[in-house]
């Protein structure tokens, strides 16, 4: 990864985390995937208290990224509001209702993988 690309993905991540905090997302976890996958640099996982809040957090995040960075995101799952996935390019964001997050436990799957050069 080129240094300017890394800086851009870190700035995107910071903007995403600020948006999630502003909208009262809970239990926000960031997983650094650099060197583990070519698809994205970071995965962010967060919870909303209800389906309505999950959808609202996702919509506001997409709107802010479009307004502030001119970034068009793609999302899946807004119709149900149980789990919304937002593809932000270098960062993918998962927003869950707590019981759905507990059921899938995707952060445990990604966090349990050994890091390159370790173990």
Image (cartoon, rainbow, N blue to C red):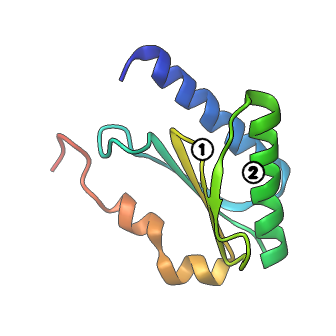
* Most foreground residue, 38 or 113: 38
Which residue is denoted by mark 1 in the rendering? 88
Mark 2 or 1 closer to N-term? Answer: 2
Local packing at callout 2 (Cα closer than 10 Å; few below 14, some 14-19, many 20+) is: many
Residue 85 appears in which quarter of the rendering? bottom right
Q: Secondary structure at mark 1?
A: loop
Does 2 appear above or below 69?
Answer: above
Does 2 appear above or below 30?
Answer: above
Q: Residue at x 63, y 52 (%)?
A: 74
Q: Residue at x 69, y 76 (%)?
A: 97
Image side of residue 50 versus residue 32, left or right: right
**Residue 56: image x %, image y %?**
83, 62
The disc label shown at residue 3, or none? none
In the rendered structure, are the residues bearing label 2 and label 1 in contact, judged by CB atoms less than 8 Å apart?
Answer: no
How far apart in space, not on screen, are marks 2 and 1 (Cα)?
A: 14 Å
Q: Secondary structure at mark 2?
A: helix
Q: Residue at x 47, y 22 (%)?
A: 5
**Residue 115: image x %, image y %?**
26, 47
Residue 28 appears in which quarter of the rendering? bottom right
Q: Residue at x 47, y 24 (%)?
A: 6
Q: Closer to us: mark 2 or mark 1?
A: 1
Residue 38 appears in which quarter of the rendering? top left
Image quarter in which the N terminus is found: top left
Local packing at callout 1 (Cα closer than 10 Å; few below 14, some 14-19, many 20+) is: many
Q: Is residue 56 visible?
A: yes
Which residue is denoted by mark 2 in the rendering? 20
* Most foreground residue, 36 or 72: 72
Q: Is residue 50 visible?
A: no
**Residue 96: image x %, image y %?**
65, 71
């Amino acid at each position: 990864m080129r240094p300017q690309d890394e800086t851009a993905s870190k700035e995107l991540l910071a903007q995403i985390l600020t948006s999630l905090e502003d909208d009262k997302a809970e239990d926000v976890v960031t997983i650094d995937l650099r060197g583990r996958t070519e698809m994205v640099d970071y995965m962010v996982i967060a919870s909303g208290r209800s389906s309505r809040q999950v959808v609202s957090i996702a919509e506001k995040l997409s709107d802010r990224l479009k307004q502030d960075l001119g970034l068009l995101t793609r999302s899946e799952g807004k119709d149900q509001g149980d789990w919304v996935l937002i593809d932000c390019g270098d960062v993918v964001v998962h927003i869950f209702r707590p019981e759905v997050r507990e059921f899938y436990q995707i952060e445990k799957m990604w966090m349990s993988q050994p890091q390159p050069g370790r173990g």
